Image: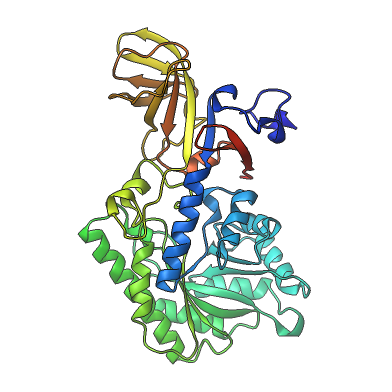
Amino acid sequence: MSRWFRNLPDGIGPAEVLGLHVSELQLPNLTLRASALENNLELLSRWCAAHGISHAPHVKTHMSPELTERQLARGAWAMTAATAAQARLLRQFGATRVLLANQVADRAALRWLRDCVEDADADYTVMPLVDSVELVARMDAELAPGPGGRRLPVLVELGLPGKRTGARSTARALEVAAAVHGSSALSLAGVECYEGVVGLPRDAAALSGVDAFLGQLADLAVRIDRAGMFDGAEEIILTAGGSIYFDRLAPVAAALPALSRPVRAVVRAGGYLAHDCGAYGESSPLSEVARHPLGALRPALELWAVVQSVPEPGLALAGFGKRDASFDIELPVVLGVRHGDEPERAPAGLRVERLNDQHAFVAGRSWLEVGDILRLGVTHSCTSFDKWPLIPVLDDSDKVTGTVTTLF
């Protein structure tokens, strides 16, 4: 079995790595810090409880059955998927409710959604997005009511001009809602947007844009409700909130007027679980710099790599590259250096300047030696998880206490 896991020695499977020190694993190796994971799970659970918000973590971050199980055990109301394929896996991971935060237009995926609706015995609900009358018509043609007239619940997506999917105006979104209301195969479950398209940095201008967008989403929910189009729903779902701006949904939801049905506000933060040493680490409302009274998220992913060559003063080549760590937003950050059995040294100005496929160019102080082990923080967890099919989990003494798998 271990031959499938490129980050473990031959003959070693998940059970055999338990108790090993990280230095005994083949390097490079991506690991998860158990104490940081526990901190992050607990912190977002407490934040949601304090604000009366439900959480549907986005599985695209890690695509791990073990981590999904932990998120569900800590009170996640649902899980979020980006594709029908991810939603299918989430069902196997044990999720019974999935927000499919995307449009579904291909025939194979629509037929799978039809199967979900027609499965009378399944304890499973999937809710995709719709943003056009044309998509509603396509879905209506491909789907059919299930047993007892069961229909597929969908969320109307609101978007912004020039950005990704979503109806470009409240008027257009209302047309989409009316089309769903008239459908024989679909039912209207709520409204959705992704405010992260406003972008970074998280400054006053961005916050103003996010708040205006979320206000428009809330207004859309009110208008749809006043038109009587939520008549088939037990509750109205109002969902937004990625990993950077999820805190902005709470006051918007709290300010909603009384509607015909209870409102469930749902955030979909996924990056919180592993956090990072870059954009999320600086911009999350629960980052260390935010000084939130509930506490701070901690980076959980660490990449370990060995110095392979010091060919010239001030430059070392480490044995990891684009195949091993994220580089789409920022490069990995050197957190510490180990020389033999000596205590870990501070990075002292060391920096990763660029990556090849399998090599990292580390510049700075010239005291690095061949064989030194670097501990690095990643700067975008989503595009680090997807490079590792098996990830050891470390305790605070750097020994392996478990493993998690990923299925990208």
Viewed as shown, does residue 171 lie left or right of 94?
left
Judge whether 320 appears above or below 164 on screen: above
Q: Quadrant of the N terminus?
A: top right
Quarter in which the C terminus is drawn: top right
Q: Which quarter of the picture shows residue 330?
A: top left
Left or right? Give the position of 99 relative to 170.
right
Q: Residue furthest left?
A: 204
Q: Which quadrant holds residue 154?
A: bottom right
Which residue is drawn at the image coordinates 29% and 24% (left, top)?
348
Question: Residue 247: where, in percent of width, then height?
Answer: 36, 64
The number of callouts visible is 0
The front one of 70 and 109 is: 70
Residue 19 screen position, x and y as percent: 63, 31
- Residue at 58%, 36% in the rendered image: 388
In the image, taking residue 202 as reference, residue 237 lies left or right, namely right
Q: Residue 211: in sight, yes or no? A: yes
Give the vertical position of 221 relative to 300 (above or below). below
Q: Where residue 60 sits: x, y (%)?
A: 54, 52
Q: How is the image coloured?
A: rainbow
Instruction: Identify the residue at horizontal 29%, vertical 17% (top origin).
Output: 365
Is 30 placed above or below 41 here? above
Q: Nearer the viewer, residue 295 or 31?
A: 295
The residue lying furthest to the right in this view is 121
Q: Position of residue 195 (x, y in %)?
A: 37, 63
Q: Is residue 286 above or below residue 253?
A: above
Is residue 195 rendered to the left or right of residue 103?
left
Q: Residue at x 32, y 51 (%)?
A: 283
